[in-house]
């Protein structure tokens, strides 16, 4: 089917107490793997690309790959810009046919973040596109943007209420202790803070930095109200491991052979994540 927006799916997930996986894709094989896995599990799915991914091949290339593949299946597929780092990139993605965007002004002052997020959400809403924004800072490294652990500011519940009222966004990425990339030790998530935010905020909440977070913590986050969970690093690692396993064999030089191995590894991983998030069967 044609690509769909994210807000209706996320609201449905919120009511049903499950979460939708948002998976970062880098190439055609990852797009195929993610959508095939979702189709098999009868789950809605969000495919997302970061600014560096978009810079690699252009937004139109990813938007077209995802929309062509989405047409082949009967589950809802969302095309989302992850960590949009400027109003212009968000606008360019909307023009290209992305059905959902994130504007990340979390590195700015609070008032600057409000202003950028509001302006971006207004632009997107006029085109029927949903906007996610971030308040507080998820630690670690995503693209070229690095946040040291001590600077990772957690989301303040009262400020979240004000932020949503002033920006008109459809979903909020919260900072509760996750970080992008793999973790050095066991991640520690602030579940009390998540509950406090959930109690005062009605729009869907998003968890970033889910790679390497133990399954029980992901499950607990979903129970406490997270409805979108972002996975990037684990997918990249699975793809590369799959490719490497084939390249070990002598005489392999056909990209179709080793890329298919990466694709299969990502498909299996995405199926596992869909089961973890409880969204299987929800597209029926
Ligand atoms: P990970 O790379 O830790 O899975 O984070 C993904 C993410 O939050 C993308 O926005």
Image (tube, rainbow, N blue to C red):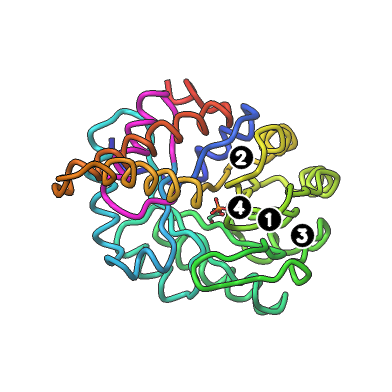
Q: Earlier in the sequence, mark 1 or mark 3?
A: 3
Please name the residue that numbered disc 1 is placed on: 184
Q: Residue at x 29, y 56 (%)?
A: 62
Q: Earlier in the sequence, mark 4 or mark 2?
A: 4
Please name the residue that numbered disc 2 is placed on: 227
Gap in angstroms between the C-alphas marked 1 and 4:
17 Å
Q: Which residues are magenta?
A: 24-45
Q: Secondary structure at mark 3?
A: loop
Counting every numbered tag in the picture gives 4
Please name the residue that numbered disc 4 is placed on: 208
Q: Residue at x 66, y 70 (%)?
A: 147
- Give me the disc on residue 172: none
Gap in angstroms between the C-alphas marked 2 and 1:
26 Å
**Some atom of ligand 1 lies within 8 Å of the CB belonging to the residue at label 1:** no
Which of labels 4 and 3 is toward the front?
4
Which of labels 4 and 2 is toward the front?
4
Left or right, residue 264 beside residue 122: left
Question: In the displayed structure, would residue 231 be above or below residue 103?
Answer: above
Quarter-of-image position of residue 136? bottom right
Q: Earlier in the sequence, mark 2 or mark 1?
A: 1
Q: Are marks 1 and 3 in contact (CB under 8 Å)?
A: no
**Some atom of ligand 1 lies within 8 Å of the CB belonging to the residue at label 4:** yes
Gap in angstroms between the C-alphas marked 2 and 3:
17 Å
**Some atom of ligand 1 lies within 8 Å of the CB belonging to the residue at label 2:** no
- Give me the disc on residue 155: 3
Q: Are marks 4 and 3 in contact (CB under 8 Å)?
A: no
Left or right, residue 8 beside residue 260: right
Q: Is residue 156 magenta?
A: no
């Amino acid at each position: 089917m044609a690509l769909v927006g994210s807000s209706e799916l996320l609201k449905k997930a919120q009511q049903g107490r499950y979460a939708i996986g948002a998976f970062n894709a880098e190439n055609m094989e990852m797009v195929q793997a993610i959508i095939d896995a979702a189709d098999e599990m009868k789950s809605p799915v969000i495919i997302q690309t970061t600014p560096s991914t978009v810079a690699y091949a252009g937004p139109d290339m990813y938007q077209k790959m995802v929309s062509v593949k989405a047409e082949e299946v009967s589950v809802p597929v969302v095309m989302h810009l992850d960590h949009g780092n400027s109003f212009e990139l968000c606008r360019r993605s909307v023009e290209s046919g992305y059905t959902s965007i994130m504007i990340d002004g979390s590195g700015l002052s609070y008032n600057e973040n409000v202003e950028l997020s509001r302006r971006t959400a207004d632009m997107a809403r006029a085109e029927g596109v949903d906007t996610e924004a971030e308040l507080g800072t998820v630690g670690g490294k995503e693209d070229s943007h690095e946040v040291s652990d001590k600077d990772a500011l957690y989301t303040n519940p009262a400020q979240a209420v004000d932020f949503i009222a002033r920006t008109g966004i459809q979903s909020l990425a919260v900072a509760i202790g996750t970080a992008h990339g793999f973790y050095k030790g066991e991640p520690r998530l602030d579940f009390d803070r998540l509950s406090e935010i959930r109690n005062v905020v009605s729009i869907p909440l998003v968890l970033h930095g889910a790679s390497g977070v133990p399954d029980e913590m992901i499950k607990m986050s979903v129970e406490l109200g997270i409805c979108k969970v972002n996975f990037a690093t684990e997918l990249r690692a699975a793809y590369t491991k799959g490719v490497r396993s084939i390249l070990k064999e002598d005489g392999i030089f056909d990209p179709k052979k080793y890329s298919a191995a990466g694709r299969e590894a990502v498909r299996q991983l995405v199926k596992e994540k869909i089961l973890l998030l409880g969204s299987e069967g929800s597209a029926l």
